[in-house]
């Protein structure tokens, strides 16, 4: 995809009452690996104590049987991380575990808080000392307020103070707690495996461990699971909050086999492609997806237009994080290492390329160049979402407005820059109608600049660190 500079952010998993809680969490995280490749962690509880292991790298690099064997207990939470706030170092890996006056607690968080700086400054003014630069740590300090009588009350009260995106799992000695912000920016799902309860960012984690998907955690819900069973709190029910689920999860981030926000992701992507074909038709011989996230939209475009689907790109799946980019200036070499064109498929053809996004435009330009070199007669670029014109403050690492190509160039200028024969994006209406949910239940801020919350401080991932350096 041409949005390859966009990084995923985080995935969370939790399990209550399973004899192999650490092993199940390891599998759950493995299924959620696409949501964060920089660090992974698991914290378990045996009912008395918490045990933590985390490290930088992929799940398979951080954990093996021996290490999992050192995580005893029947309850666990886990996290895979891409650093949307805080640097990619071990201090900022999650779960974040602390001991405080009410006992032990660990937390794992997906999302970004938009009032993190304000809250942190306030907490520090009252004597809180932070161990990391993650905004997630703010929850733990809020929970620690002496007037709360339990971990449970601490979570319910602290979520009222934060603004922004959070899908959380919290582990105490005897409880697993899950919470989702009132807008429901990030997905969070609830399932059952025998007598055990499970929580995961996406349902693909349930499929791997053969758990049943019960339902999504509702926006604004705090779900507490302990020996009494699951029970819910709705701390925002008297407030006038609106849903703002991240529509870009459907377009790009989530795995196609997951069900999030009431829809299967692959089916939504197929409909995005169909809507794109209706809105932005092209005269062409073949429809070529940019793998992997463009695959389902290209299938929809081909089904709707009647133009045959052809896999003109092949992707190298073995690059991983350890791959060292060549230093030479030829950008097309870097692009080719990840994705190569199959000359025999595109040579002499008029090609419609389906991609899920264009961020800066340089990668898309290199791919067009590769197609032309392989003999494509015409290249028509079609994008399965609207142009990205503004940053995301809710956990997605888009570049600043000045770097977003659609924020700075007209459609004609983008066409000229990419050297394509035509270009077309899906409209906001076309994108939203690909889901079965009410259009107003989604966030579209990076396409529309209509932010669903007040943005207190424009977060960038190093902001909290910059602040620390000045102290
Ligand atoms: S701004 Fe864009 S990426 Fe961020 S939550 Fe909203 S729709 Fe998703």
Image: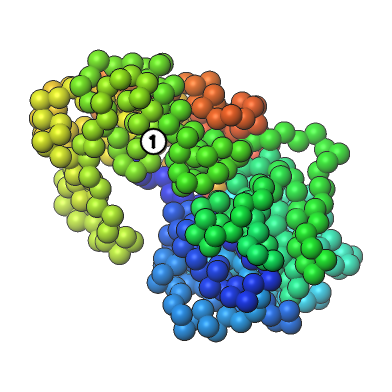
Where residue 79 sits in the image (x, y, percent)? 55, 63
At horizontal 81% and vertical 74% (from top left) the residue drawn is 102
Towards the viewer: 439 or 266: 266
Question: What colour scheme was applied to this rendering of the protein?
Answer: rainbow
Badge 1 element = helix
Where residue 146 sits in the image (x, y, percent)? 86, 68
- Residue 291: image quadrant is top left
Q: Count numbered badges in the picture.
A: 1
Towards the viewer: 448 or 422: 422
The residue wearing badge 1 is: 296
Q: Is residue 106 left or right of residue 5?
A: right
Looking at the rendered image, the quarter that the N terminus falls into is top left
Q: Is residue 383 left or right of residue 432?
A: left
Looking at the rendered image, the quarter that the C terminus falls into is bottom right
At horizontal 22% and vertical 45% (from top left) the residue drawn is 314
Indicate if the residue with disc 1 has its beta carbon within 8 Å of ligand 1.
no
Regarding residue 131, the answer to whether it shows in the image is: no
């Amino acid at each position: 995809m041409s949005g390859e500079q966009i990084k995923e952010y985080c995935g969370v998993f939790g399990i209550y009452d399973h004899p192999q809680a650490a092993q199940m969490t390891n599998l759950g995280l493995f299924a959620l690996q696409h949501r964060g490749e920089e660090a992974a962690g698991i914290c378990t509880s045996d009912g008395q104590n918490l045990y933590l292991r985390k490290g930088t790298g992929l799940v398979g690099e951080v954990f093996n049987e021996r290490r999992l064997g050192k995580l005893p207990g029947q309850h666990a939470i886990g996290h895979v991380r891409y650093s949307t706030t805080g640097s990619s170092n071990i201090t900022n890996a999650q779960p974040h575990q602390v001991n405080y006056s009410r006992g032990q607690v660990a937390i794992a968080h997906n999302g970004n808080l938009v009032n993190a700086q304000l809250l942190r400054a306030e907490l520090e003014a009252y004597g809180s000392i932070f161990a990391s630069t993650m905004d997630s740590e703010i929850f733990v300090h809020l929970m620690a307020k002496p007037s709360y009588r339990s971990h449970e009350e601490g979570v319910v009260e602290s979520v009222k103070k934060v603004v922004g995106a959070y899908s959380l799992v919290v582990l105490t000695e005897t409880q697993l707690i899950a919470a989702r912000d009132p807008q429901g920016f990030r997905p969070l799902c609830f399932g059952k495996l025998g007598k055990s309860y499970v929580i995961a960012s996406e349902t693909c984690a349930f499929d791997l461990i053969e758990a049943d998907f019960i339902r999504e955690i509702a926006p604004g819900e705090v779900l507490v699971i302990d020996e009494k069973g699951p029970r819910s709190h709705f701390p925002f029910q008297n407030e006038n909050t609106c849903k703002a689920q991240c529509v870009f999860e459907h377009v790009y981030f989530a795995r196609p086999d997951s069900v999030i926000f009431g829809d299967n992701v692959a089916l939504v992507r197929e409909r995005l492609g169909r809507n794109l074909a209706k809105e932005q038709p092209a005269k062409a011989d073949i429809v070529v997806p940019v793998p992997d996230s463009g695959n389902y939209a290209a299938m929809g475009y081909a089904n709707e237009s009647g133009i045959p689907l052809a896999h003109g790109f092949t992707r190298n799946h073995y690059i991983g994080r350890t791959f060292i980019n060549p230093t030479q200036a030829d950008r097309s070499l870097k692009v080719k290492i990840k994705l190569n064109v199959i000359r025999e498929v595109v040579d002499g053809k008029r090609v419609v390329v389906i991609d899920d996004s264009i961020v800066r435009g340089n990668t898309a330009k290199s791919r067009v160049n590769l197609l032309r070199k392989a003999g494509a007669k015409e290249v028509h670029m079609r994008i399965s979402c609207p142009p990205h014109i503004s940053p995301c403050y809710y956990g997605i690492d888009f570049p600043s407005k000045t770097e977003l190509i659609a924020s700075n160039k007209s459609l004609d200028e983008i066409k000229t820059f990419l050297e394509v024969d035509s270009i077309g994006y899906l409209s906001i209406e076309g994108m939203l109608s690909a889901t079965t949910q009410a259009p107003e239940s989604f966030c579209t801020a990076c396409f529309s600049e209509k932010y669903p919350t007040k943005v207190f401080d424009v977060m960038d991932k190093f902001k909290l660190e910059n602040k620390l350096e000045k102290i």
